[in-house]
Amino acid sequence: MNRTPSGARGRPNIVFIFADEWRAQAAGYAGDPNAHTPHLDAFAARCINFPNAVSGCPVCCPYRASLMTGQYPLTHGVFINDVELDPGCESIARAFKAGGYRTAYIGKWHLYGSPDGAFGRRAQRVPRDYQMGFDDWKGFECSHDYNHSHYYWNDEPTRHTWAGYDAFAQSREAARYIRDHADADPPFLLMLSWGPPHSPLDSAPDQYRAMYSDRPLTLRPNVPPGLEADARAHLAGYYAHIAALDDCLPIVLDAVDQAGIADNTIIVFTSDHGEMAKSQGLNTKLFPFAESVDVPFLLYDPRQGAAKAREITVPIDSPDIMPTLLGLAGLDIPDAVEGRDWSPIVRGERRPSGEEAAFLIMAAEFTEIRFNGMRAYRGLRTDRYTYVRDLDGPWLLFDNRADPFQMTNLIGRHEHAALQHMMEDRLQARLTELSDEFLPGQVYLERANLSHYREVTLPLKRRWVDPWSAPRR
């Protein structure tokens, strides 16, 4: 039985669920033969799928800061990991509160930052002033010990421990919140942040690791020869975490149904960025390749007609999430927001033009970018093409429809000169729009007093060479 929305507002509740490092390709509904995701697949069957969703700055803290502010990294200032986000920012929580919502956050935070540049705050309590205006906050700065992780509640100093595998405990807490606020006025915005499938990859519960202990795994064709064994060992643990998270999902979804608010609750499932897992010969994230940039983005809005799957092709990016959710709730979007509001397309009021493009940015070199001898970059991702340049010039151009595994770089090819020129013009227009000077990464680090951060001083381990193309001239 569905309840009539309480109060006079008639506005939807919003449940926003996001994982850490779950790439778009790693789901049954996305065609991955390795992924055991029956609950997610069933959810996808009644959702709007954004198949071109991206994390434009594909690393933890920059994504989270863009999620909170609707801004790009050089605006909110969190363009490398463990930088403190301005606690006085016009956050998504404050914007929803201004519209009459109650707001809650559960799980990994990673926005308090560590100004020492050496992860000094990761285990500390996040002060109430740094919780960005959420009414109810039950989280922690950063931990990857998923079976012994801790949390703090609002401004209480007591350190608590999640029971068992923390994603299950956090999902149960989210379910409790939903039940407790189902009859409440005002409506609520609830954000649930899971830590897996981020490494360590040997820490999923035993039953899920057993699923992949001897299972043959199908690799993406862009894993270079010689790296297959490493990739399979890595992916066994990765998919074990994903299988566990798939069993966490119905804890939350069932709570919405059982509370009787399914006809007035928007639900989103996504991730902060992806994971290379040896595709292109690379590890983890930060790169502009599909495995790192592409993220799942499923949106269930019961007000949009029959509960059946459909696709929206616009490349929704992390700064677009805040304005789109505000738009779906009928709330004002703060002037400081830079992302696009795609809610008119969700509501069917207009169609994608095909000219939409997400902005890709890595403003400074750190961790995996440094390890692989790469440079900071800027780029665009449309519904078909990926175009990226670094300070040496045009770097990558892929036709993602014809070449979904990005093994044919079109840069410098005579037959694609017009396409390259067009994408470069569009990128330059976007840089101008954002007042992005595209300076060397060290300039931004020095301006922001971040040059002492450990991750920006790591040594070069190797120089990456495209496994599939001739070297750039």
Image (cartoon, rainbow, N blue to C red):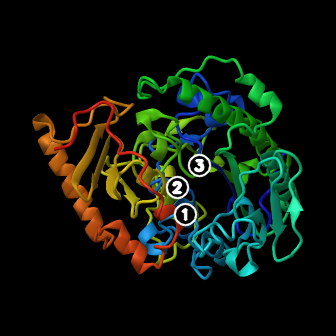
**What's the residue at 66%, 75% (across, down)?**
132
Residue 59: image tag: 2
Q: Earlier in the sequence, mark 2 or mark 3?
A: 2
Q: Earlier in the sequence, mark 1 or mark 2?
A: 2
Q: Residues within 10 Å of mark 1 (few under 14, many from 20)?
A: many
- Label 3 with label 1: CB-CB less than 8 Å: no
Q: Residues within 10 Å of mark 2 (few under 14, many from 20)?
A: many
- Label 1 with label 2: CB-CB less than 8 Å: yes
Is residue 356 visible in the rendered image? The answer is no
User: What separation in Å lies between label 3 and label 1 (alpha carbons)?
Assistant: 16 Å
Of the pair 191 and 64, the residue shown nearer to us: 64
**What's the residue at 47%, 66% (across, down)?**
79
Q: Quadrant of the N terminus?
A: top right
**Which residue type does callout 1 highlight?**
Asn
Q: Residue furthest left?
A: 414
Q: Is residue 162 above or below residue 289?
A: below
